[in-house]
Amino acid sequence: MTTSPSWRLKRYGRCIPDSTGGKQWKVFEANDNGPEMFLTIVKSGYLLVLQGQESLDTIPFLGGSVKVQHKSENLIFRYTVNGESRVMRMQLDGAEECARAVAELKKYVSVTTQDATPPPPPPSNQPPAEASAPAAQEKVEVEPEVVTGSLTIRRLTQHILGESAVTLPQAYRDPSQAPGDLEPVLRLCLLDPGFPAFVESVEDELRKLLEG
């Protein structure tokens, strides 16, 4: 069985909304007394951040708009899932370890490498500065197009593959099952050894729809 590539993390942080409507950083740090923290990429198209057996975060490369910045031993992820923008930062165990992770990431997403070394994520109780100098010079991202009515198969396929950023009509965002009903189905799928291959097959068929 093929083992998913993994890289050790010194620090991991994600920006989350707070009760006042603003945002703050939640930061996890590796330590000698706790389980190892690492990121791994599964070939079905997901990046996982794990601490021991606990999952801290998941980024789907399929169906999301993911942008990655690489600076020395640091990675910054900006991605959109279901119309919600998120930011995640991680510090790997050295620049060489980070470079190996970047080489694997480039198989799935675009990675921009910058020479300047950014500061690591701030301590847990301290919010980060609004933007570093390089980040402040970035182009303003275009807001996802708001779509009303129905979508063509091609347009919906582009959205699922992350090739077109749109805000779907409500009818496309309401699940047919209640959230509580999905957990046993998801657990069953994840226990099936053939499930990752099935996910890859679905992506292949979606891309054939775009080519047709």
Image (cartoon, rainbow, N blue to C red):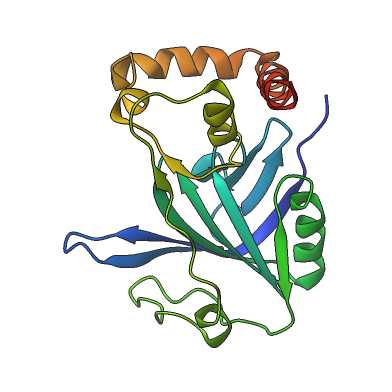
Q: Which residue is drawn at 38% across and 17% down?
A: 182
Q: Is residue 75 above or below residue 160?
A: below
Residue 124 lies in quadrant: bottom left
Q: Which residue is drawn at 40% across and 79% down?
A: 130
Q: Is residue 99 left or right of residue 171?
A: right
Q: Nearer the viewer, residue 167 or 56?
A: 167
Q: Is residue 53 above or below residue 119?
A: above
Query: Is any part of residue 51 visible from this angle?
Result: no
| Quadrant for the N terminus in the image | top right
Residue 119 lies in quadrant: bottom right
| Quadrant for the C terminus in the image | top right
Q: Position of residue 107 (x, y in %)?
A: 79, 46
Q: Is residue 210 above or below residue 118?
A: above
Q: Count how many numbered circles sit on residues in the image.
A: 0
Residue 37 lies in quadrant: bottom right
Query: Is any part of residue 33 visible from this angle?
Result: yes
Q: Position of residue 178 (x, y in %)?
A: 28, 17
Q: Which of 57 and 206 is in front in this view?
A: 206
Q: Which of 92 and 47 is in front in this view?
A: 47
Q: Residue at x 39, y 23 (%)?
A: 150
